[in-house]
Image: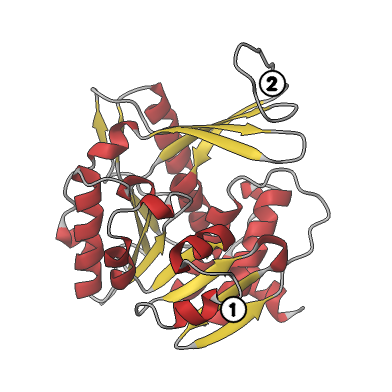
């Protein structure tokens, strides 16, 4: 039976406000002027746009503020073909926002506000059943509450209904409450190098052996200039990095990788192709921007012709 949505993204609909600075640290009592200001959907919201560009039918469910930030975020999602009818608005809290500071060496720091995103209510089980897969991140899982319980129940229901569950714990992985519950419901877990070390609690050389024995999930490891690795069914294989001539902005590379990987899996390709697709989409994101990301078929053609 066909599903209404290829991918249902749950929670963390965040708006990014990015500013450039000369260098870190920023000291108290000082004033810095940024030569550039960029406002755009971030995190899973940016990922939703990328997945839609790749050809997936993407739906988003979250609670956002009834404010101008929320208006802007919804407009950008709708313009990109993301289904937003499952979003709800709250007039007592602001839309989730991240202030991104980026220095001249592309180092970055984030200051975030969860806002209305911390009050996401129950998701109707029928929405899970009408989706091929779900995706969620770990920012709202560091404390138990409405959103935590909503995501946990969604992951459980998705697993029961044999939907593909994608989980990216993110940089707050060490603070996630009972993280193993979410891993156990997941089919694919995305980790960067630091997150893999935090989860495995060992050195990086030993991490693949630890992950081979942990949960039922496949683990996609995002390793920047070293490409990526996939760990599944006790096996490990590597995907080479994509050469990039110019790096414009590294923020969002991980979300882009997730979107590329997910789009390949949901389009019927195997994990190795998904791994390479993730690398390519991430490279386009940081070198040329989201608007340069093509349909998944063109990405696959690029992989097959290299």
Between 95 and 193, the one lying in front of the other is: 193
Q: 154 left or right of 189?
A: left
Q: Is residue 37 visible?
A: yes
Q: Mark 2 or mark 1, which is nearer to you?
A: 2
Q: 92 left or right of 214?
A: left
Q: How is the image coloured?
A: secondary structure
Between 239 and 15, the one lying in front of the other is: 239
User: Disc 2 on helix, strand or loop?
Assistant: loop
Q: 272 left or right of 289?
A: left
Residue 229, compared with residue 38, is above or below; it is below
User: Disc 1 on helix, strand or loop?
Assistant: helix
**Residue 189, position in %: x, y?**
43, 68
**Residue 245, position in %: x, y?**
83, 55
Circle number at residue 114: none
Q: Residue at x 47, y 66 (%)?
A: 201
First in sequence, mark 2 or 1: give its number.
Answer: 2
Q: Residue at x 41, y 49 (%)?
A: 82
Q: Residue at x 59, y 78 (%)?
A: 273
Tell me the crowding category of disc 2: few under 14, some 14 to 19, or many 20 or more residues within 10 angstroms, Cα based: few
Residue 128, compared with residue 211, is above or below; it is above
Quadrant location, the C terminus: bottom right
Q: Which residue is denoted by mark 1 in the rendering? A: 273
Q: Which residue is denoted by mark 2 in the rendering? A: 34
**Residue 224, position in %: x, y?**
67, 60
Q: Residue at x 27, y 59 (%)?
A: 178
* Res 97 → quadrant: top left
Between 246 and 217, the one lying in front of the other is: 217
Q: 145 left or right of 84?
A: left
* Res 117 → quadrant: top left
Tell me the crowding category of disc 1: few under 14, some 14 to 19, or many 20 or more residues within 10 angstroms, Cα based: many
């Amino acid at each position: 039976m066909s599903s209404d949505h290829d991918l249902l993204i749950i929670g963390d609909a965040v708006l990014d406000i990015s500013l450039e600075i000369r260098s870190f640290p920023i000291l108290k009592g000082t004033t810095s002027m940024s030569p550039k200001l960029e406002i755009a959907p971030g995190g899973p919201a940016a990922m939703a746009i990328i997945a839609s560009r790749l050809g997936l039918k993407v739906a988003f469910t979250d609670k956002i503020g009834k404010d101008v930030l929320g208006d802007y975020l919804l407009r950008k999602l709708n313009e990109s073909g993301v289904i937003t009818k499952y979003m709800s608005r709250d007039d007592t809290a602001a839309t989730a926002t991240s202030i991104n500071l980026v220095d001249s060496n592309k180092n970055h720091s984030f200051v975030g506000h969860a806002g209305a995103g911390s009050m996401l209510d129950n998701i109707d089980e029928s929405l899970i059943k009408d989706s091929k897969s779900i995706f969620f991140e770990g920012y709202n899982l560091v404390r138990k509450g409405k959103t935590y319980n909503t995501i946990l129940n969604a992951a459980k229901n998705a697993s029961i209904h044999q939907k593909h569950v994608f989980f990216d714990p993110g940089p707050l992985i060490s603070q996630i409450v009972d993280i193993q519950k979410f891993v156990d419901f997941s089919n694919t877990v995305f980790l960067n190098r630091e997150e893999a070390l935090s989860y495995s609690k060992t050195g990086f050389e030993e991490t693949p052996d630890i992950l081979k024995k942990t949960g039922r999930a496949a683990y996609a490891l995002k390793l920047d200039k070293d490409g990526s690795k996939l760990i599944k069914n006790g096996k490990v294989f590597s995907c080479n990095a994509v050469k990039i001539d110019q790096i414009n902005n590294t923020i969002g590379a991980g979300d882009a990788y997730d979107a590329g990987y997910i789009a390949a899996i949901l389009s019927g390709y195997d994990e190795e192709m998904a791994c390479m697709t993730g690398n390519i989409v991430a490279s386009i994101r940081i070198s040329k921007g989201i608007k340069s990301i093509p349909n998944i078929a063109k990405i696959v053609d690029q992989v097959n012709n290299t």
